[in-house]
Image (tube, rainbow, N blue to C red):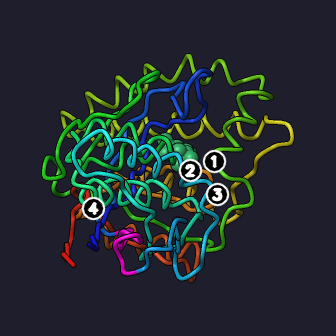
Amino acid sequence: MTVVAEASPSLALIKYWGKLSGGVNVPATSSLAVTLGALQSRSTISDRGRDGNEAATEDLIVIDGARQPTEPFLPVLNEMRSRARGSHAGEPHAVRVESSNNFPTAAGLASSSSGFAALVVGLDALFGTSLPTSELSSIARLGSGSAARAVYGGFSIWPAGAKHAEPLVPGDHWPDLRVLVVVLQTSPKAVSSRTGMERSRLTSPFYNSWVQSSETLFETAQSAVTARDLEKLGMAMRQSYLRMFSTMFTSDPPLIYWLPESLAVIRRCEELRARGIPVWETMDAGPQVKLLTLASHEADVTAAIGDAVPGAAVISSAIGDGPVIHSRNER
Ligand code: PMV
């Protein structure tokens, strides 16, 4: 059987940066995220053992045409196989996964969140396990923390210490909200978020302050999303990414994901706000800048960014839905 699963990345407005000890990817900070509907990971997953190739015992993972080492995927693959064994389906086989993204991979655009979300949802359909979404969230977390949120559409939350994320409100809660993703560099980042957040935890003198102060921002952002209050949300999300970056800049060795163009976009957002245009920026472990604004201001903001950083690609996204199984072929 072959299954095609699609999922969109989870963009954190309130950040997860740092893990608690004693678990796999259990967050030290509560995060709140939106689903970027315009960006998609699409995974075609088939069962190799039942694929006419009985000798295939190894998983095969291909992303954007390039074969990947299987090791980062094994926690998710093995957990899903163990759930399948515990159900009815008999011994699950090795799988072939071919995944592609309609946006740059591993460049700070949360491709791991959508990739692992598509993987768990696809395996759930392939193996016939029909797990609750909260369990899929918990298993996706084993691949990449942010993937725990990407199994939900709309806005999701992931409380500190929790093994799975939760839905907050669906995508249609805020129809005129737009995320503009300003793509400044498409090459993969030099330091993965997994390595970076551990470095911050171990070496930044500001790490504990970041963790302690983040909870209030999380609570403020939740009520701002519920009330569709962009200014309140924007002020909380700005504090969140800048406090997160303060632990990155003060890690040893320092983590400097920004480019000069990233700062140019931040400055331009400040100028737009001073002119009364509601636009609020955030960044992750990469140079790209993501802007929240309203549909009615999208054209003005896009033009102003094009003026500040000529040549930068701007991808516009409404808030997306959760993963879907696109097609399923029985053999
Ligand atoms: O779980 P990872 O490895 O995708 O790390 C996510 C880290 C940030 O994108 C910087 C923040 C977040 O909450 O998504």
Q: Nearer the N terminus, badge 1 or badge 2? A: 1
> Does the image show residue 319?
no
Q: Is mark 2 within 8 Å of ligand 1?
A: yes
Which residue in the structure is indicated by mark 4?
A: 126
Residue type at mark 3? Answer: Leu
Q: What crowding class fits label 4: few (fewer than 14 Cα within 10 Å), some (14-19), or many (20 or more)?
A: many
Instruction: Determine whether the residue tagged by mark 2 lies in a helix, strand or loop.
Output: loop
Disc 2 versus disc 3: distance between alpha carbons?
A: 13 Å
Residue type at mark 2? Answer: Asp
Which residue in the structure is indicated by mark 1?
A: 193
Region of the chain picked out in magenta, as a range: 39-52
Give the answer, above or below, for where 312 lies relative to 235: below
Q: Is mark 1 within 8 Å of ligand 1?
A: yes
Instruction: Determine whether the residue tagged by mark 1 lies in a helix, strand or loop.
Output: helix
Q: Nearer the viewer, residue 260 or 97?
A: 97
The location of residue 58, given as percent across then percent down, is 55, 65
